[in-house]
Amino acid sequence: MSDLLDDPIPGQNTPEYTVSDISGEVKRTLEGAFGRIRVRGEVGRVFKARSGHLYYDIKDDRNVLACTTWKGQISGLSVVPEEGLEVVVTGRLTAFGAQSKYNLNVDEVAVAGQGALMALLEKRKKQLEAEGLFAPERKKPLPYLPQIIGVVTSPSGAVIRDILHRLRDRFPRKVLIWPVAVQGSNCAPEVANAINGFNQLTPGGALPRPDLIIVARGGGSIEDLWGFNEEIVARAAAASDIPLISAVGHETDTTLIDYVSDRRAPTPTAAAELAVPVRMELLAWTGEQGARLSRAATDAVQRRSQRLRDLSRALPRPDSLLNTPRQRLDLIADRLTPALERGIQNRHLQVVKLSAHLRPSTLRNLVTSRQEAVRNLSSRLSLRPIQREIKLQRQTLSRLGERLGTAQATRLDRMRQQLDATDRLRETLSYKATLQRGYAVVRADDRVVTTKAEAVKHSALQIEFADGVLNTDQPAAPRPSQKKPSKKDAPDQGSLF
């Protein structure tokens, strides 16, 4: 009984909770107590998962707050968190019961003050410069007179009107405008897409590819121009195959695209002046150069003509140049005839000397010696190998003759069989087979008669049967002027067919 009257153990009557109940209560308490909040701090560790979600920390000198931005929320951020950047994040505080952690789901990020923006800009600038995107050797020269100019800017601002007006005054060109937002969260992706889009156009296509790109915007604060400081814009400008002029802000404003572009213009109007020359100045310069060229050509011709006349005075007359060769020709001509005569006499003496050695006895002795040499060679030559070779050739020839005879007989037999088959086919297809069935062929004057009217015109007919030919005689058909014979006088023509 004493045990029943004792006091219970302290805390024994406290209700029990499951782990999920506690996690749910903590999550509801956090979300209900804080709701949507803004937190200022420095960005710590930043990690982008393979799924596309962004995980990072916001910290101060004592504590760290875990933050999460889902994949679908990243495109709405005006500033992407970077480590070391001081920011103000806005979102909803929630808990993750699976790991007993709480974090802030961030859907808006803003840089905390202009000093932080400049620090971020300086960090990006050093990173891109280290990659070589600012190097002068990678910048492309601008075309002297582009046919088509692409302009990336807002279509409703004064910038595009200033550019078009300046181009029209200096040298009218075709202009393609790619409308973009020039400030706000959509500025950076739209400008980068416009630069990439111009580069992907086909030269000479339905929408031709521009020869030069101008990225332009009017002046503004560093926050207004921040879209042109984004890394995506700088890398798109650096990767452009088309020469690019940046004209963002006023002359004192500097953005990252100014460093990576091929040419920076202080204002949009100055960009138009860099893009094309002045047409009237170009025409005047062309005319001046043409006049200089004409004068130079005329002066050169005159100088060379004068030089030619001066040199011609120093040359001797043509007749005097030919006097010496003429004299030399005359001397050679006088010496030619005696030289020919002496040459003939020398050749004649040589022939006489050589003919003195040619006697019949000498020739007979030479022939005799050659015959003796031939007899000696013939006695040394054996006929047995030749006879053996002849015998072998005869045997080979005999075998070949036998093979040829056999092949010829086989071929003749095969051809005879083909001829017999062809003859049987001819007999089958011949009209004589038709005669065996009771038909006949009527001819007159070696031509086949096929109608009665034609047969009446002939006095003699040949009728070929299967067993022979029958020759018949009949009177010729009466002429049109003669009296038509009576039925008694007419022959029985039906008996002939």
Image: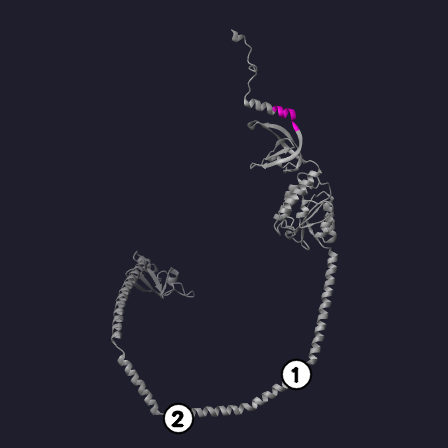
Left-right relation of 479 to 86: left
Magenta span of residues? 28-36
**Most prominent secondary structure in the magenta stretch?**
helix
The residue singled out by tag 1 in the image is 318
Local crowd size for mark 2, using a 10 Å CA cut-off: few (<14), some (14–19), many (≥20): few
What's the amino acid at mark 2?
A: Ala
Local crowd size for mark 1, using a 10 Å CA cut-off: few (<14), some (14–19), many (≥20): few
Q: Who is closer to the viewer here, 44 or 70? A: 44
Among the 4 quarters of the image, the one containing residue 41? top right
Of all residues shown, which one is farthest toward the top?
A: 1
Q: In the image, is residue 304 above or below residue 17?
A: below
Q: Residue 433 placed where, x, y %?
A: 31, 58
Please tell me how many numbered marks the rendered image carries: 2
Q: CA gap, disc 2 to disc 1?
A: 58 Å
Sequence-wise first label, 2 or 1: 1
Label ID, residue 356: 2
Magenta-span inclusion, residue 34: yes
What's the amino acid at mark 1?
A: Pro
Q: Quadrant of the C terminus?
A: bottom left
Q: Residue 416 placed where, x, y %?
A: 29, 62
Left-right relation of 279 to 377: right
Magenta-span inclusion, residue 384: no
Q: Who is closer to the viewer here, 184 or 137? A: 137
Q: Say if residue 256 shows up in the picture.
A: yes
Residue at the location (72% across, 50% down)?
272
